[in-house]
Amino acid sequence: MNEDHQRFGLNPESVLTEIVSYLQPRPCGHKLIRIGGDKDGAYLLPDDLEGIKWCISPGVNNFKYFEDQLLELYGVKSILVDYTSDPQLFATPLQEGKQIFYKKWLAAKSNLEQMQVSLQDLINENCEKGDDLILQMDIEGAEWDVLSSCPESLLSDFRIIVLELHDLDKLDKANFASNIVLPNLRKISQTHSCVHIHPNNTSFVKDYGNGQPLIPSMVEVTFLRRDRIRQGGEVVIPHFLDIINNETMSSIALGKPWVTDSSSLAATVGKIRLEMHDKDLDFISLHQRIETLRHGMEKLLELQLSSLSTGTVDPQHSYLQQDRHDEVDVAQDCSISFSSRLQPFDLGIEKVTEFRPFFFHTCIEDNPWLMIDLGRPVEVTALEIGNRTDSCQARARCLSLVLMDDNQLPILPSAIPLLESAAFLSGKKSIHRTNLPRLRARFLKISAQDTALHFSSIRVLSPSHQS
């Protein structure tokens, strides 16, 4: 490394240090959300997507879950570019007028004969002046030529830039490091700040020696335009929402300077989660749910012991030993209300029903909820939820239930965690059942955190002798 840089009169350590500094995430004042599912092709973005008009996505590989979710949840249209892809082979069909596909290579300049199109021409042909955009680019190393052709004024059109950066194992080549990588990262840093970095575990780690950081050959980096950065927040590396790109290969954990001895507890939890290859459970939420469950179970035990002493509860039908025989669904066709409705995906249904892939769809919110009115107090024994059947099953996480009386006042001192299984969250199991304390309730409120709710069915079960 030293000899190659010395030929150009460069200090290799200072070049590498500056490159790493531009890939060091900073707090942005927005929480990060994962867009694109739970497999390769999903990325973490700041939750600052409202008002963005278009996403330009070079590098499709016949999958567009990222773009589908942007359209479904935020109304963001997409321009997809990939000469190697074919709309007939896409895993999901193009949405007419909302997803435009170019069977071309993205390049520094447009060239009709070579089937090349530039980033500037894509914007000129499809976007209005002043549109806020997203750039999500994974083009197997060609990103450096494309970025070199982009002036700062073009990059500033993008509120969010997500790049898969390749060939970082070649930073010991002076021309590549000093004349290609470093100028491009400097240019991006004039308008944007790095807010997240994630090593793609299909890559390998390069040791440049001399006390320099160990650098993966391929990383996914998210940048946010500086005018969108707010005060507050913290950097969590690795983040508990990070995915493992290839589950058959070992994960890669970033070291210093990305993860330091003074890293937050959240970062440590995220690192443990990543190393254990656990995509379905957020350890922070799991800890909170365990504490909630412990508190709730203590209160429920107190309630049941009190009820048993007065003879109002049959000990054969306790919360922990539930009889499933002779149950009927008392929720079908009952009124249901929601914290929000995501248009145009919500069907406008106002009664509990069963419909696939889902019969309602809330927005992504801090605390989405639904509430069922059974019409009268009914003794309930179990709740069964049918997950969405086509995709996004992992959103049905951290669910809790509140049982309420005629006046919508909670019957129990705390919410009941539904403790959904990994099989349910991955789509391998479509129904999740939770046995309930045998109490009379009229209203049932199901809520979650930082997600959207969309179920295909809900059943509230009651002893058949009540019907």
Image (tube, grey):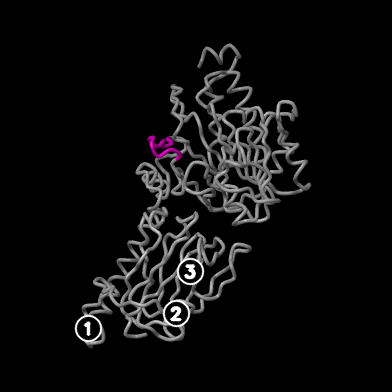
| Circle 1 residues within 10 Å: few <14, some 14–19, many ≥20 | some
| Circle 3 residues within 10 Å: few <14, some 14–19, many ≥20 | some
| Circle 2 residues within 10 Å: few <14, some 14–19, many ≥20 | many
| Residue positioned 70% across, 29% down in the render | 115
Read off the magenta span.
Answer: 245-255
Q: Quadrant of the C terminus?
A: bottom left
Q: Secondary structure at mark 2?
A: strand
The numbered mark, 1 or 3, whose residue comes first in the sequence reads: 1
User: Which residue is label 2 attached to?
Assistant: 443
Identity of the amino acid at label 3? Glu
Q: Secondary structure at mark 3?
A: loop
For marks 3 and 2, give the CA distance: 19 Å
Identity of the amino acid at label 1? Leu
Residue 147's image quarter? top right
The numbered mark, 2 or 1, whose residue comes first in the sequence reads: 1
| Residue positioned 50% across, 31% down in the render | 218
| Residue positioned 75% across, 29% down in the render | 112
* Residue 128 colored in magenta in the image: no
User: Which residue is label 3 attached to?
Assistant: 354
Q: Seen in the image, is 310 located left or right of residue 381?
A: left
Identity of the amino acid at label 2? Phe
The numbered mark, 3 or 2, whose residue comes first in the sequence reads: 3
Residue 290's image quarter? bottom left
Examine the residues drawn in magenta and state their main secondary structure. loop
For marks 1 and 3, give the CA distance: 37 Å
Q: Is residue 406 above or below residue 370?
A: below
User: Which residue is label 1 attached to?
Assistant: 308
